[in-house]
Amino acid sequence: MDRPVSVLEVARSETDAPARPPLIDSSRRIPGLDGLRGIAILLVLLCHSIFDMHPKTALGSHLQMIGRLSWSGVDLFFVLSGFLIGGILLDSKGSPSYFKTFYVRRAYRILPLYAVLVTLFALRYIKAASAGPLGGFSHSPIPLIAYVTFSQNVWMAMWGTFGAGVMASTWSLAVEEQFYLTAPFLVRGMNRSHLTHALLAVLITAPLVRTALHFLFLHGNFACYVLMPCRADALSAGVLCATLVRSPRWANLLFSPRRSALLWIAGFLALGLVPLTLWCDGMSTPMITIGYSWLALFYSTCLLIAITESSRIIRLVLSNRYLAGLGGLAYFTYLFHQPLMEACRRLLGLRFSYSSDGTQLVGGLLGILVTVVLAKFSWTFFEKPLLRRGHAYKY
């Protein structure tokens, strides 16, 4: 594999045309994005292992408040996905094999590992009464066909529940798959200006849609959390970032010596996260109306900071090999961390009280360790070979 190329390094190499913006295209790996993906999955892991607990002491409750927004790691994933997928679509929109190559590559990346998870989950329907010595299966009103068709988030919205806990995280995968059904057609069918206006329109209308659902739907706030149109602002913000860095006017501005302005913008947006952290949860009314959009803007700014290398300290953090390595294992880790954490908690529950804070904490952390080890094996022997097959299809 080629050495990762710094965006600024590419910019400096353009000596024949110094006024040109730095080269940004989907064929070049941007090292900072691996670290940013690592932060996203780390937030999700911390949320489900520590900050989703219900401590029984006042001190524990105050400490938990620090990580109240850790669930928003999934919003960072949405922004990253929109940027990376949007960039691929923008760079290949003139290809005669545009649709075929895109969907075949996504199928190789997404479906095999997801099929393993759904197959294991389907075993509950063969012996639904018991999970063996680890206890019984949790009740789920969501049918198996919903997971097969990536429509589980629609069922979740109707019932107002995530269903079986081991499959709860898959709602965001459904959101992304539904997004992939529309984004390629929009990118292919619009010029850059019209696409930018369409993305801005999504950013404006998404909070309006969420507000309408809040008032009109039985499980309105829950639906806002899991439905694709309600989370389309984060995905569209990522695509908009991909569009901006490919525009000569905006790229010159973003990569200019004044790019440190991004840090001030991120700081301002971070201030807005303080009240969201202190007084709001993931499905509170302030969060579903404007909070999701605020998070999308904040994470989009973080993305641009990572790309433009606006801060040396941030660049060093994002280039940390452990953080970047975790980012490379994010897909398996995201899909399987909840089942493995629950299995470890139930194993400890055979000897200790399952509901105790100690069992929940230690079981969660042990589950994370098991997940990361298995993710490494999965990447080396399962996912990477499949990716190579997918990339045999060229744009």
Image: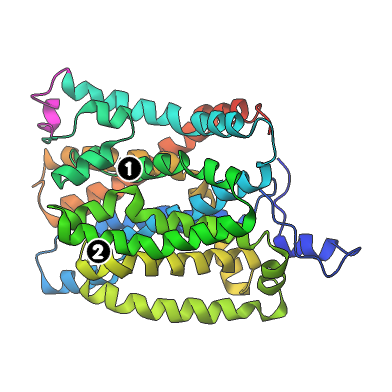
Q: Main secondary structure of the magenta part?
A: loop
Residue type pointed to by label 2: Thr
Q: Residues within 10 Å of mark 1 (few under 14, many from 20)?
A: many
Please identify the quarter of the rendering in which residue 286 is found: bottom left
Mark 2 in CB contact with mark 1 (< 8 angstroms)? no
- Image coordinates of residue 131 in percent, x first then y, are 14, 27
Give the number of the disc on residue 18.
none
Q: Quick one: SS at disc 1?
A: helix
Residue at image coords 48%, 49%: 326
Q: Residue under circle 1? A: 337
First along the sequence among labels 2 and 1? 2
Q: Quick one: SS at disc 2?
A: helix
Would residue 284 be found to the left or right of residue 329 on screen?
Answer: left
Would residue 61 be found to the left or right of residue 29 on screen?
Answer: left
Give the number of the disc on residue 211.
2
The magenta span reads 126-137
- Image coordinates of residue 342 in percent, x first then y, are 22, 41
Q: Residues within 10 Å of mark 2 (few under 14, many from 20)?
A: many
Camera sees residue 76: no
Q: Is residue 319 above or below residue 355?
A: below
Residue at image coords 21%, 43%: 156
Residue type pointed to by label 1: His
Who is closer to the viewer here, 44 or 274?
A: 274
Residue at image coords 33%, 34%: 150
- Image coordinates of residue 231 in percent, x first then y, are 36, 55
